Image: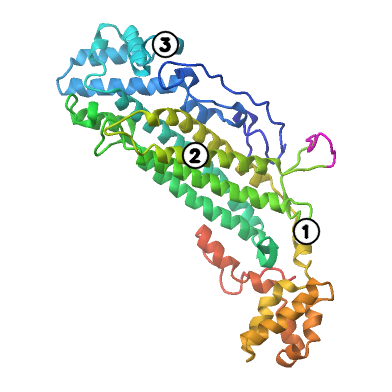
Amino acid sequence: MTVGASDRVAPINSDKGNAQLEPTRFAGHRPCGSDSLPPSQSAPMIPRYSRPKMVAVWEPQTRFRIWFEIEAYACDALAEIGVIPKAAARTIWEKAGKATFDVARIEAIERETKHDVIAFLTHLAEIVGPEARFIHQGLTSSDVLDTCLAVQLSRAADILIADVDELLAALKRRAFEHKLTPSIGRSHGVHAEPVTFGLKMAQAYAEFDRCRARLVAARKEIATCALSGAMGTFANVDPRVEAYVAEKLGLVPEPISTQVIPRDRHAMFFAILGVVASCIERLATEIRHLQRTEVLEAEEFFAEGQKGSSAMPHKRNPVLSENLTGLARLVRGMVTPALENVALWHERDISHSSVERMIAPDATVTLDFALARLAGVVEALVVYPENMQRNLNRLGGLIHSQRVLLALTRKGVSREDAYAWVQRNAMRVWRGEGDFLALLAGDTDVSRALTETELKEQFDLGYHLKHVDTIFARVFHVLLPAAGEGGRGAAG
C-alpha cells in the first residue's frame, strides 16, 4: 500500500517511510448568534490529522448542496401530488441545481437572522427567484438538518469501511508472510508460551473484520430520513414526500420522529467509532511494546533522513503508533457526548446540535486518518524473526513448563505434585542457576516419571504451532491443507 502525502497520512509507505509531519494549524473560531459557528467554520479541522476526501464530506459547500437536494426533491414530490406547480419544481432544479452557493453571503445573512437554515433559504431564494416560495413547504429546520446529517454520516461510514478494507489487506498480507514465524506470547508482559507473529497479525485482522461489520451496521442505523414537519406529525407535509426524498438520497424513512430523528441512532454510530478507535489503539500499543529496545521484535519503518530526537541522534521511536494511541483517545472522548444527546426535552431541544456540529466531523475525520495511518504502519512494519528467536530462548526453556507439567500428569503424577516439581526447577532458572531442561533431567522426582527422551520431547517448539493452519482457516476462511502438508512449522 502506498499512502500519498496529499492524503495527509504523510508518515509512511513501503518506499519512503516516515515523512515529516506538518505544522499543526487550527481552523479559526468566530462567534455567532446561533448555537453554531458560521457555516464555513463548522468544526475545528486540523490539517495535520485530516485527509481531503473525508474533510470534503463536512465542507460547507457539501452541506449546502445536500440541503438543496433535500428541498428540491421535496418540491418534486409536492409537485407530483399536486401541492405545488410542476413548473415551479422544474425551475428550482434549473436555476439552483448546478449552482455554487455563496458561503460568505449565507454567513452574512445568518449574522442577521441568527438562524442557519433560514439564511440558506434566503440565499436560495436569491438564486431561484419567485418560485422559491414553494421551497420548504411544510418542513421544519430539523427535517433538513437531520436528514443532511444522515447523508453525511452515511458517506463518512462508506469512507471508513473502505479504510478498514485497506487495513485488512495489509494485515492479511503480513499474517501470511509470518504465519509460521515463531515468537513468544506474553501475559502480563511476561513470557508465556510460543505463538507466531502471523497469529498476532491474524488476531488483529479478525478484530478489524468485526469492526468492519460494526461500521456496516452503524451506517444502516444512521441512514434514516425525517421530513415529517413540526413535531413529526406530518400535519403540513404528506408522508409520501418523506418517502420520495429518502429514496432519492439512499436513506429509509424514520419510522417515527418527533421534530428530530431519535438520537439513540447517533449514539450507536459514535459508540461504534469509539470501539474501532480502541481496536486501533490495541494494535498500536502492541507495536509500541514490540519496538522497545529490550524486545525489538518489530519496529516502525525508519526512513532515510528521518530524525528521532532533537537531542539524541541514535533514537528511533514508535511515533506513529504513539500518535495513533492519542487519536484513539480523542475519538473515544466523543462517545460520551453522543450518549448524552439521547435525552432531549419533550419532542425536541437543540442541546444535541452544538455537540454534533463538532463531533460528527472531528470523529470521522480523525478515525479516517488513524485507520489510514495504521494501514501504512502495518504495511511497512519491519519484523525481526532473529530477535523473536532470541527472545524465545531468553528464559532457558521455561516457556515449555506447561508441557512438562502435562506430561507428568499423563504418567500418573498428581497435578499438585507435578506443578510443585516443575515450579521448583523453574524458580531456579529465574534465579540464574541453570538451564530448565538440564535441571529437570537432574531432578529425581521428574526423572523417575519421564525418560530423557520423553523430557526432551516437551521442548519441541513446533508442537505449539501445530494448529496455526486451523486458526488461519477460521480467520481468513481458507481451506485447510491436506493431511501432512502443514501446521508444525520450524522447531526451535
Along the viewing direction, whichever of 254 and 113 lies nearer the viewer: 113
Q: Residue furthest front?
A: 345
Along the viewing direction, whichever of 318 and 388 lies nearer the viewer: 318
Q: Give the range drawn in magenta.
A: 305-314
Determine crowd level at label 1: few under 14, some 14-19, many 20+ residues with C-alpha closer than 10 A.
Answer: some
Determine crowd level at label 2: few under 14, some 14-19, many 20+ residues with C-alpha closer than 10 A.
Answer: many
- Compared with residue 65, is residue 352 higher up or lower down, i.e. above or below? below
Mark 1 is on which residue type?
Asn
Specify whether 326 is left or right of 37. right
Along the viewing direction, whichever of 11 and 179 lies nearer the viewer: 11
Mark 2 is on which residue type?
Leu
Q: Would you name the residue on which mark 1 appears?
A: 387
| Count of marks placed on residues | 3
Rendering coords of residue 477 (x, y %): 50, 59
Q: Using the image, tell me which numbered label, if any, was put on residue 111.
A: 3
Residue drawn 27% across the image and 23% down it? 140
Identify the element where label 1 is drawn: helix
Q: Using the image, tell me which numbered label, if any, was put on residue 160.
A: 2
Say if residue 229 shows up in the picture. Answer: no
Rendering coords of residue 226 (x, y %): 28, 31
